[in-house]
Image (cartoon, helix red, strand yellow):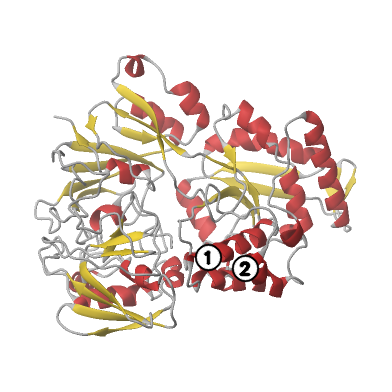
Amino acid sequence: MIFRTFLSLFFICLFLSEAFGTMGISLDGTLKYEKGLSRFSYTSPNTVKGGRLVLHDIGSFDKINPFTLKGSSPYGLEDLVFEPLAVSSLDEPFSQYGLLAEDIEVAADKKSVTFTLNTEAKFSDGSPVTVEDVAYSLELMKSNQVHPQFNFYYEDIKGYDLLGERKIRFNFKQPNRELHMIASQINVFPKKFHSQNGFEGISNQGGPAVPVGSGPYVVTDINIGKSITYKRNPHYWAKDHPVRKGMYNFDEIVIKYYKDQIVALEAFKAGEFDFISVNIAKQWARDMEGKKFDDGTLVKKTFPHFNNAGLQGFLMNTRRELFQDPKVRQALGLALDFEWINRSLFHDQYTRNNSFFSNSYLAAKGIPKGLELEYLEPYRESLPEEVFTKPLSTPVTSGHQDVRNNLLEARRLLEEAGWVIKDGVLRDQNGKPFSFDILLVLPTFERVMAGYVKNLKKLGIQATYRTIDPTLYVERLKTFDFDMIVISYGQSQSPGNEQRNYWHSSSADKIGSANYAGIRSLAIDGLIDRIIYAETKEELIAGSKALDRALWYGYYLIPNWYLAVHRLSYKNKFATPESLPLYYSPFQLLMTWWIEQ
């Protein structure tokens, strides 16, 4: 699972707290808060509500609906305005606690799950959250009105039964270790509001309708493409709920939009907003300095985390004839000099990705054996030999000779694929030059691409790179209109249905899917099913490692790098809890802070 991450289910443990009947579910029947949850330990009992938080985002937005395919929605909308039936704990890898649902009952055969709604749950317009709203939300998530990623994610929930005023049962196509958890992640929408205003977010008057959800904030001001303002709902139904205590402490949250991260950093240092997560190594090493940092007005600090790093890489679109040969894709990977990039551009801050599940217990190690090998054996004829004989590894480029050797090996692979150099240009048997375009959304990546393109030129390859507008970039990705892009696939501690959206043959031609590489492989399809329908942790690990190998030696992405800390800077006006969560984003961390009085 990925939308509400770090969740899984095998054994189930339910308990009641005095105030809200909070329900807890875990992988092995044990829960950190099994004696009764009053608040999460990474929150504080001493928070103070109030104040204004100003944040930023890059690009713009042109819609007020984060669930549809077309357009871009504003930052924070899904997390602040809408709510699911249950939420994850950020300090447990496999747990979830009830919110809109006060009780969850999983059938003995695991073919269904029954939710009992909290009697206090209300939308921001004051109307109660009903089972009809839950049913409508499930239908919506399985329809063509939403982004196709939701169709893939909820595919195995076949329908529902209304069992009473507060009870609804979701029925599954077949047993699945995590479908109960996936079902509880569905955001619940007000059916009546949508029937009057439409799901697309356009009111009867033709302007953007202010979205209605059950979350802690409401939208109060919309300046399309430039800013959006959220205000804390004083009548929020769950303000004293154990899974919300000590969180969402700001009276007002404003999101301002900037053209790029360089402009945004200068705006931050000038005091235009309060908090920034820095994802550019050079900025962190050289640009976060000056009087405001010296006198303590601005704080610069790293926060460790244990998130599954997944994989970032230069992705090749195999729908393009140029990238259909695995030898070509492997050769292009040999041209990347990571050590030079890390040393010269990143100040040695990064670790290279070594798996599609980097920084995780799910990453494949050594050569396959046991259950992992058993899962791979049926596909031996269709998978590369390296899957069975070679540990996952990246090209070594610690010195000039290593780089030269890698380029010589790349040239050999290209020749085997039918490409030869003529007049300094790599050409196919018809004389067509090897040329492609790298599409970027962040101009800061241009300095990385300059070195990479230089190495490609030594192979006779004519590669260009360019940065385009974020909105246009998103649309190009949705329709797979690119040669190569830089992409990051985040992973949870419990991968599942989202893998279909990433790599499955059924998503290769579905507009808006995350299968940007255009992967069509029966072996990969089968290994994805091993993950989704795993019944034990052992089967999940084996399936993930087997999939890791098949993807790695398909050479669909050129592995990049990751960081096991969040690099954060902020105005020295916040108070923070004593404990950090383990699995979190900067935004989730910030929602546990408050403004110091």
Query: What residue is rendered at 50% in x and 71% in y?
Result: 534
- What is the total number of numbered labels drawn onto the structure image? 2
Q: Quadrant of residue 454?
A: top right
What amino acid is at disc 1? Answer: Glu
Which residue carries the number 1 mark? 538
Query: What residue is rendered at 74% in x and 57% in y?
Result: 322
- Residue 183 location in percent, x, y? 34, 71
443 with respect to 372 (left or right): left
Q: Secondary structure at mark 2?
A: helix
Which residue carries the number 2 mark? 371
373 with respect to 251 (left or right): right
Q: Is residue 247 above or below residue 378?
A: above
Q: Crowding near pointer 2: few (<14 within 10 Å), some, many (20+)?
A: some
Q: Is residue 511 above or below residue 458?
A: below
- Residue 418 location in percent, x, y? 87, 57
Q: Quadrant of the N terminus?
A: bottom left
Q: Crowding near pointer 1: few (<14 within 10 Å), some, many (20+)?
A: few
Mark 2 and mark 1 lie on one chain; the one further toward the N terminus is 2
Q: Is residue 320 above or below residue 264?
A: below
